[in-house]
């Protein structure tokens, strides 16, 4: 693995700014990857790693930057739970850890870098040096990853009988004998302007 400083620099470039989330995200990855025995996430181990993130905030960009996992490669899955946690899976061994950033670390950061007045700046610097158990909760888990969420070619591709959109990866629904896309069943996130 590259050094913490190098990885932080890269993730800051990808993300667009340095922030506490970048520090947390990079440290979370280093911890998780060592626990599931991934040494070279973007090279020799790139097909072995799968990450499930539970929030779409700053640290998620750091996780993508360090692991090389992404939505487009389907090696990263985003679950919209609003929780600062991620599960890292070694697909070869099935070893997986869920790491949660502790809310208590905000308070604990006050013990460090007392000379820095600005709260966010102090947190950022403190998170670089705080102990892992002050920052994170670690759970050994068995991750449940549906076959249709794995990288590789789509397992299924069907056309919605209502709107004609093509639906991949078993996201279609069968309602009263009709194959439908989710938006035709559950409602749309947009309204069309005619
Ligand atoms: Zn940020
Ligand atoms: Zn449809």
Image (tube, rainbow, N blue to C red):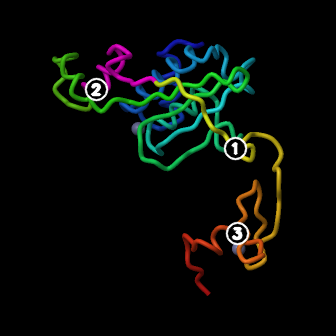
The Cα–Cα distance between marks 3 and 2, rounded to whole angstroms, is 43 Å
| Residue at left offset 82%, top offset 65% | 158
State ligand 1's quadrant.
Answer: top left
Give whichever of discs 3 and 2 has the lower sequence position: 2
Above or below, 189 against 137 in this view is: below
| Residue at left offset 32%, top offset 26% | 124
Residue holding disc 1: 146
Residue holding disc 2: 105
* Pick the front one: 100 or 109: 100
Mark 1 burial class by Cα count in 10 Å: few <14, some 14-19, many 20+: few
Expressed as whole percent of the image width and height from the top left, the position of residue 126 reads 29, 19
| Residue at left offset 41%, top offset 25% | 23
The quarter of the image holding the C terminus is bottom right
Mark 2 burial class by Cα count in 10 Å: few <14, some 14-19, many 20+: some
Q: Does the magenta portion include 16? A: no
Q: Is mark 3 within 8 Å of ligand 2?
A: yes
- Residues in magenta, as a range: 121-138
Nearer the viewer's eye, disc 1 or disc 3?
Answer: 1
Nearer the viewer's eye, disc 3 or disc 2?
Answer: 3
Q: Name the disc covering residue 9, or none.
A: none
Q: Is mark 1 within 8 Å of ligand 2?
A: no
Q: Does the magenta portion include 136? A: yes
The quarter of the image holding the N terminus is top right
Residue holding disc 3: 181
Q: Secondary structure at mark 1?
A: loop
- Assign the magenta stretch its main secondary structure: helix
The Cα–Cα distance between marks 2 and 1, rounded to whole angstroms, is 33 Å
């Amino acid at each position: 693995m590259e050094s913490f400083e190098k990885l932080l620099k890269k993730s800051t470039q990808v993300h667009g700014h340095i922030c506490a989330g970048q520090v947390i995200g990079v440290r979370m990855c280093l911890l998780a990857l060592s626990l599931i025995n991934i040494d070279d996430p973007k090279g020799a181990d790139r097909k072995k790693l799968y990450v499930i993130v539970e929030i779409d905030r700053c640290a998620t960009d750091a996780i993508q930057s360090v692991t090389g996992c992404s939505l487009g490669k389907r090696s990263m899955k985003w679950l919209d739970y609003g929780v600062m946690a991620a599960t890292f899976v070694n697909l070869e061994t099935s070893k997986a850890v869920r790491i949660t950033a502790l809310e208590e670390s905000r308070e604990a950061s006050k013990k460090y870098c007392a000379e820095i007045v600005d709260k966010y700046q102090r947190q950022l610097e403190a998170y670089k040096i705080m102990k892992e158990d002050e920052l994170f909760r670690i759970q050994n888990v068995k991750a449940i990853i549906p076959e249709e969420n794995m990288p590789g070619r789509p397992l299924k591709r069907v056309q919605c009988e209502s709107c004609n959109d093509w639906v991949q990866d078993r996201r279609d629904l069968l309602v009263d004998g009709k194959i439908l896309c989710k938006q035709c069943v559950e409602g749309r996130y947009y309204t069309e302007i005619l």
